[in-house]
């Protein structure tokens, strides 16, 4: 708690943004785990059944495995069965739809990676500003204590930002 008091509002902002960023990262990790939990071992036998003309077996296999691969293959089969030719346009639509889910929130994580070091630098600048303000106002023996406390604040807010960057 003393660390937060010394770091001030900048350190609280760094911790809050770091927590939010790690929440998004863990959430994306769980999303990817769900999408790939069945693995891809089922795809080859399903494709073999399709090569023999058994579209229903392929659809059943895709429905049993509702992850990314299953959804994409099922969408392609629906286009194929409707009599339309499976073209690059259809392929692009399917891939773009699935890619949107994979890319969700990655922009926020990237933005946090940009903002966190700047917050650390802001804390350093604010702490040094306080330090030099204390130097100009006080000429007694307490100047050293004031300077040490303000430099401490500057360095405390820089440290968490550096840890997040290196992770």
Image (tube, grey):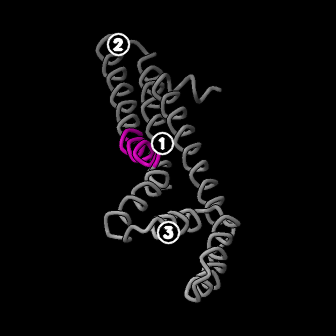
CA distance separating discs 3 and 2: 86 Å
Residue 12: x and y in percent read: 53, 27
Question: The N terminus is located in which quarter?
Answer: top right
As helix, strand or loop, the secondary structure at mark 3 comes to helix
Circle 2: element type: loop
Q: Earlier in the sequence, mark 3 or mark 1?
A: 3
Residue 14 lies, with reference to residue 71, above or below; the image says above
Q: Residue sitting at 56 percent across and 68 percent down?
A: 69
* Residue position for label 2: 139
Q: Residue 15: which quarter of the image?
A: top right
Q: Is residue 25 above or below residue 152?
A: below
Nearer to us in this view, 149 or 91: 91
Where does residue 7 sit, x and y in percent of width and height? 50, 27
Rate crowding at label 2 as few (under 14), some (14 to 19) or many (20 or more) other CA atoms within 10 Å. few
Query: How far, Cα to Cα, is label 3 from label 1?
Result: 59 Å
Vertical order, 43 against 35 (above or below): below
Vertical arrangement, residue 22 with respect to residue 76, above or below: above
Q: Are marks 3 and 1 in contact (CB under 8 Å)?
A: no
Q: What residue is disc 3 on?
A: 81
* Residue displayed at 43% across by 39% down: 158
Query: For the residues carrying marks 2 and 1, which lies nearer the camera in this image?
Result: 1
Residue topped by disc 1 = 159
Q: Judge the density around disc 3: few (<14), some (14-19), many (≥20) Cα neighbours within 10 Å.
A: few
Residue range in magenta is 104-117
Q: Looking at the magenta stretch, what is its main secondary structure?
A: helix
Q: Earlier in the sequence, mark 3 or mark 2?
A: 3
């Amino acid at each position: 708690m003393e660390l937060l008091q010394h770091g001030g509002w900048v350190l609280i902002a760094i911790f809050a943004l770091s927590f939010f960023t790690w929440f998004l990262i863990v959430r994306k990790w769980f999303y990817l785990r769900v999408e790939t939990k069945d693995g891809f071992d089922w795809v080859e036998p399903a494709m073999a059944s399709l090569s023999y003309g058994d579209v229903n077996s392929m659809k059943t296999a895709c429905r049993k495995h509702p992850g990314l691969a299953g959804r994409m293959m099922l969408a392609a089969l629906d286009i194929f069965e409707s009599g339309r030719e499976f073209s690059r346009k259809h392929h692009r639509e399917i891939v773009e739809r699935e890619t949107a889910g994979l890319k969700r929130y990655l922009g926020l994580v990237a933005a946090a990676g940009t903002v966190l070091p700047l917050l650390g630098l802001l804390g350093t600048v604010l702490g040094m500003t306080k330090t030099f303000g204390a130097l100009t106002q006080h000429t007694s023996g307490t100047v050293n204590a004031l300077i040490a406390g303000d430099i401490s604040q500057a360095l405390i807010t820089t440290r968490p930002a550096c840890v997040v960057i290196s992770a």
